[in-house]
Image (cartoon, rainbow, N blue to C red):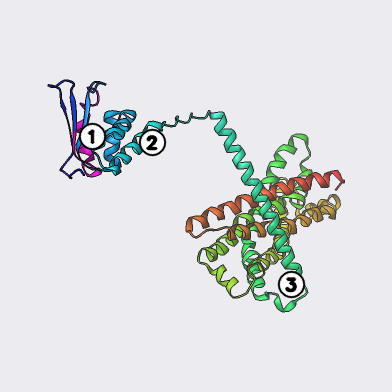
Amino acid sequence: MSTSMATGSAQLDAHIQPPCLRIAGDWTLAHYSELEHAIAPLATSLGADVSIDLSRLGALDTAGASLLVCLLGAKRLSALAREATDLPVAQRALLQTVGTAMDAYHEPPKPSRPSSVTVLLERIGRTVAHVWRQQLQLLGFIGLTLETLARNLLRPRRWRITSLVSHVEQTGLDAVPIVALLTFMVGAVVAFLGSTVLSDFGATVYTVDLVAFSFLREFGVLLTAILMAGRTASAFTAQIGSMKANEEIDAIRTLGLDPIELLVLPRVLALLVSLPMLTFVAMIAGIVGGGMVCALVLDISPAMFLTLLKSDIEVRHFLVGLVKAPVFAFLIAVIGCLEGFKVGGSAQSVGEHTTSSVVQSIFVVILIDALAALFFMEIGW
């Protein structure tokens, strides 16, 4: 059995015929760097006529065997290992195994860089698949919310009245100033722009109809829903998401309570109550803003403004706008709560899903409003 020596060495004796390469010492990982530098000049000068002497080889591991493969070649080393009967069986087996493995190894080809069109199509496909999964999750969560609502509707003792009233105050009463101010300013802008265009045709009196139609049918409910999507949906996501990150929802389930009943239903019902009322406030504020511009710019007195409003605008326009409010309220609340339940265990996840809830809510509100406008136009409303 070979005795262990110090750092391995490889010496080429060219003075004898045939030349002989003597492998000695320990060829192990501890000496890898030294051996790698030592064999670098020898690897190019070894011919097929050079004999190999492994009799003084000391300790050997896979790192040293791989260096011998680099020096002698995989096939040549495997043949030497079979013929070197003076080496221990374990070293011969190791040399044969490493030689065979490195001889059979082929470096995989580098993957080609995809074209820009391929990358673009891949991103589009991934986005479409993500949106599809989101819609499936939303439909499932809507069904779960409606099922929980139907189960508790006839059980007054399970109603969360305190929570409901608190959320009505947060989502409804606290939002009145911002909704009224925004719609008042938009009503004034619509009236000003309408009067500017209609004055070219001598029909500035129809600015009253423009303001009333736009706010009763579209702007009142749409601006309110967009404000609620940015203000309330984000708040729902942040509240539920923080509870999810702090494992409070897991604690609720551990206590045998239903998070949908405890957290989702009060928020959904509160927004169902608040959004129609805020829509009504938005309609009034927008019409008042338009009436102010008519009074200051067009010399249309408030009495004349109200007279034109009553004679030209039917109640159905008010109903068309108001009937969309509960639908928007339900979707905004459900999306905000769903994104809250998706939050992971970090603050970054809370921020990401809060942003996602706002974007989804605004997108869904505008989409449903466009479809509703087409529907009411087709039925003559």
Residue 252 coordinates in the image, percent (x, y): 58, 72
* Circle 2 SS class: helix
Residue 157 coordinates in the image, percent (x, y): 72, 79
| Mark found first going from the N terminus, 1 or 3 | 1
Tell me the residue that label 3 is attached to: 152
| Residue 36's disc number | 1
Q: Do tag 3 and tag 2 residues touch (Cβ < 8 Å)?
A: no
Name the one closer to the observer, 67 or 219.
67
Residue 188 coordinates in the image, percent (x, y): 67, 49
| Mark found first going from the N terminus, 3 or 2 | 2
Front of the two marks 1 and 3: 1
Q: Residues within 10 Å of mark 2 (few under 14, many from 20)?
A: few
- Work out which residue is located at the far front of the displayed protein and give it: 85
Q: What's the residue type where badge 2 is placed?
A: Ala
Name the one closer to the observer, 324 or 78.
78
**Residue 120 occupies quadrant:** top right
* Circle 1 SS class: helix
Q: What's the residue type where badge 3 is placed?
A: Asn
- Viewport quadrant of the N terminus: top left
Tell me the residue that label 2 is attached to: 101
Q: Would you say residue 299 is visible in this rendering?
A: no
* Circle 3 SS class: helix
**Residue 61 occupies quadrant:** top left
| Mark found first going from the N terminus, 1 or 2 | 1
Residues rendered magenta in the picture: 23-45
Q: Is residue 215 left or right of residue 315?
A: left
Residue 370 coordinates in the image, percent (x, y): 74, 45
Q: What residue is at 58 percent from the left and 73 percent from the top?
A: 254
- Residue 294 magenta: no
Front of the two marks 3 and 2: 2
